[in-house]
Image (cartoon, helix red, strand yellow):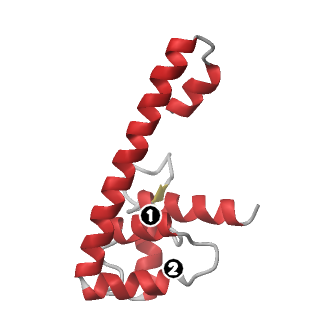
Amino acid sequence: MEKQHLEATINKESVRSITRMIKQFEKEIERIEVKIKAYIEADDNLKKSMEQLIQVQGIGEVTVLTILTHLPELGKLSNKEIVALVGLAPYCKDSGKKNRTKSGIWRANANSLNALYGDLKCSSL
């Protein structure tokens, strides 16, 4: 969001301020990533999952970290259960009186799904 602000700003002082904020956010992101990687390194199951996921073509390190962070069930559930949990095989919400006129899709873990789709879109460009 700050990068978008930077693109729309012409005032030199504002540009410097926004640039400082972006650098601060980047440092914070690096700090958080180091902590997540250390946590994964300390857990054999997470480490094994990361090694397996990073080998999938089109999936980068950030996506792997996001998936492992938001899907602690990975490795504990079947493939079908994980696919349903992430929302790649969504279930319809059309039962009961409440939903008779309005239908929708149930997705339990949008963060992992968004990370996965974001990485796949970028890799296919």
Q: Nearer the viewer, residue 23 or 71?
A: 23
Q: Secondary structure at mark 2?
A: helix
**Residue type marked 1:** Ser
Total marks shown come to 2
Question: Pointer 2: what residue?
Answer: 54
The reply to whether the C-beta atoms of the residues labelled 1 and 2 are less than 8 Å apart is no
Which residue: 55% across, 24% down? 5
Q: Disc 1 or 2, which lies upstream in sequence?
A: 2
Horizontal and vertical percent position of residue 38: 27, 71
On screen, residue 125 above or below 13: below
Which residue: 59% across, 63% down? 119
Horizontal and vertical percent position of residue 89: 52, 72
Which residue: 47% across, 87% down? 52
Horizontal and vertical percent position of residue 83: 47, 77
**Quick check: can you spot residue 74?**
yes
On screen, residue 107 above or below 42: above
Q: Nearer the viewer, residue 89 or 116?
A: 116
Horizontal and vertical percent position of residue 43: 24, 82
Q: Is residue 7 left or right of residue 36?
A: right
Q: Mark 1 or mark 2, which is nearer to you?
A: 2
Give the distance between the C-alpha atoms of the residues marked 1 and 2, in whole angstroms.
Answer: 15 Å
Crowd rating for badge 1 (residues with CA inside 10 Å; few <14, some 14–19, many 20+): many
**Residue type marked 2:** Ile
Which residue: 44% across, 68% down? 86
Q: Nearer the viewer, residue 88 or 111?
A: 111
Question: Pointer 1: what residue?
Answer: 112
On screen, residue 19 above or below 60: above
On screen, residue 89 above or below 113: below
Q: Where, by quadrant of the figure, is residue 6 drawn? A: top right
